[in-house]
Image: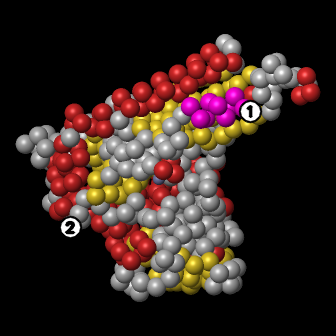
Amino acid sequence: MLYQLSYGTLHFRFASAKVETLFEYTKRLPKNFRSIRKIPFFAMLEVGRNKRFAIFAYQAIIREINHIPMNIVDRFLAYTQFDTQSAEDAGKTPSTDKQMTFARYLRDELVQIGLKDVELDDEGYLYATLPSNTKKKAPTIGFIAHMDTSPDASGANIKPRIVKAYDGTDIVLDAAAGIVTSVEKFPELKRHIGEDIIVTDGHTLLGADDKAGIAEIVQAMVYLMEHPEIEHGKIRVGFNPDEEIGLGAHKFDVEKFGCEWAYTMDGSELGELEFENFNAAVAKIDITGVSVHPGYAKDKMINACRVATDFINLLPANEVPEKTDGYQGFFHLIGMEGGVEKASLTYIIRDHDRQKFEDRKKLIIEAGEKINAQYGEGTINLVVKDQYYNMREKIDPVMHVTDLAIKAMEEAGVSPRVKAIRGGTDGAQLSFKGLPCPNIFAGGLNFHGPHEFLPIPNMEKAMEVVVNICRLTADFNE
Ligand SMILES: [Zn+2]
């Protein structure tokens, strides 16, 4: 019997007695791709409006039916077909329902590849286990990646394309629209000459942040199951929503995850290993002035906007994001508004060093006190709130966690690049919740925009690093 898979004018015909397998497989696809019509001598799969998804789904089905294992690139490309953009201020978890659609797909994939304890909660947190295959007393460790993509750029209808054996010239993403990833603007391209690189069509992000991380973890689990000679302890995997809006870790169930330590696969270039991030606080400053008719204002008016300027001038002018890098902290004025009667300022305060961070908060409070001494008590009302802390504090006592990652990279032929994050990371929150969690490269570059690209060898090396960490951890207690 002949079967047909159709989307619009695209028809895939294939002969197979395993139509039941096909039907089973299609059940794992998102709802709008799921409807199946049985036509005499044909099995028809309606795949919604997304042609590319149809192709990926078709390829996946054919692989499944012919028992050809999915490779890491197939997996990643299939993931990119899910729009998983998160949204600020949605007031729910996950912030967007479409993340849940992907979470369900991923859950079914984890079951299908043979992981155990696969569990998706109502808020889109997905956990699973690769059971230990050794008698060694290995600690349980975990790997974490996030399902959402940044609200900064569209994640809908992503059209990934593979540039084969990249030749070192500018990559034209959309010739008609003149969208080009130029070597001049993105010199990091030069490190990837000769490699196959996945790029976008110039109109969306790629979503390698962090679907590359997911593909690497899933593929590493498949690899370990296919290679039982590699001994490993119990491995947990965790995929969470809403990392890009800073809410990925706060509902992550560290207790249920049950790991001694874990790694987020969410860094960028090959070799990156991060276990230091900023200490972070936000300061909200409300200024109350006194409004008087300007013609009669002498010695009476207090102009809130001018008070705001005075306040700004009390903070060091050179300690701002645009004048700092490396381990230098800053005060960053992220918002100001106001009139004569009222004004408000919002600052974020960042520093890797905890003492310097505390000093910065003190400085901003003292600036408020100076203003109040000058203009009268209550002119400035200032609230400073801590946001997150440098995970280094939590990693320092367990440096074997990063040592293992470094060794795993070296054994994969990857030179580790340890660097301090000038920002926050899910791993920091997790580390303070009791799960030490450094961040390892996922391989993509230029995150959060249409110039995002993913060299395939980066992704393959990241997978190898995951496998090596699992293997090395088995001997940790021996
Ligand atoms: Zn990310």
The N terminus, quarter of image? bottom right
On screen, 417 above or below 69? above
Residue behind mark 1: 305
Can residue 10 be found in the magenta stretch? no
The majority secondary structure of the magenta stretch comes to helix
Residue 52: % across, % down = 59, 74
On screen, 474 above or below 174? above
Q: Amino acid at mark 1?
A: Cys
Residue 109 seen in the figure: no
Asked whether, in this view, residue 21 is left or right of residue 194, the answer is: right
- Report the residue at 38% width, 32% height from top: 356
Q: Which mark is residue 101?
A: none
Residue 234: % across, % down = 25, 44
Return the residue nearer the eye: 279 or 88: 279
Residue behind mark 2: 413
**Residue stretch in magenta:** 305-314
Asked whether, in this view, residue 28 is left or right of residue 335, the answer is: left
- Report the residue at 67% width, 12% height from top: 377
Residue 333: % across, % down = 60, 40
Q: Quadrant of residue 406?
A: bottom left
